[in-house]
Image (cartoon, rainbow, N blue to C red):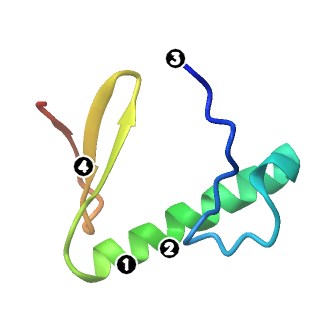
Amino acid sequence: MEQQMEPIFLRYGGAEKLTTEMTKDELDQLSASILRRAKEKAFSKGRPIIFGEEGKVYAEWPDGIIEELKV
């Protein structure tokens, strides 16, 4: 798989510099901020967030329930 070489501008994170110029700590803080904002937006509408972990896909609902999705 070819690695993306173009910089990623993060919509929800409000990053002021390119991800390629960030330290690991800055990237960790940014990703936590993005996740928090995505959850706030989805959960406020009663929708889940969908994420993958260890090759499986999950939905996390506003009430805290996490369920594995069969894809």
Label 1 CA crowd tier, 10 Å (few <14, some 14–19, many 20+): some
Instruction: Identify the residue position indicated by label 1 in the image.
Output: 41
Q: Quick one: label 4 or label 1, which is nearer the N terminus?
A: 1
- The residue positioned 69% from the left and 37% from the top of the image is 5
Q: Which mark is residue 59?
A: 4
Q: Quadrant of residue 15?
A: bottom right
- Locate residue 22 relative to residue 4 in the image: left or right: right
- Locate residue 59 relative to residue 37 in the image: left or right: left
Give the alpha-carbon distance from disc 1 to disc 3, as whole Å.
Answer: 32 Å
Amino acid type of the residue tagged 2 in the rendering: Arg
Image height of 26 relative to 5, above or below: below
Classify mark 2: helix, strand or loop.
helix
- The residue positioned 24% from the left and 49% from the top of the image is 59
Residue 29: give x, y in percent of width and height: 73, 59
* Dots 4, 3 in contact, CB < 8 A: no
Q: Which mark is residue 1?
A: 3
Q: Quick one: label 3 or label 2, which is nearer the N terminus?
A: 3
Instruction: Identify the residue position indicated by label 2 in the image.
Output: 37
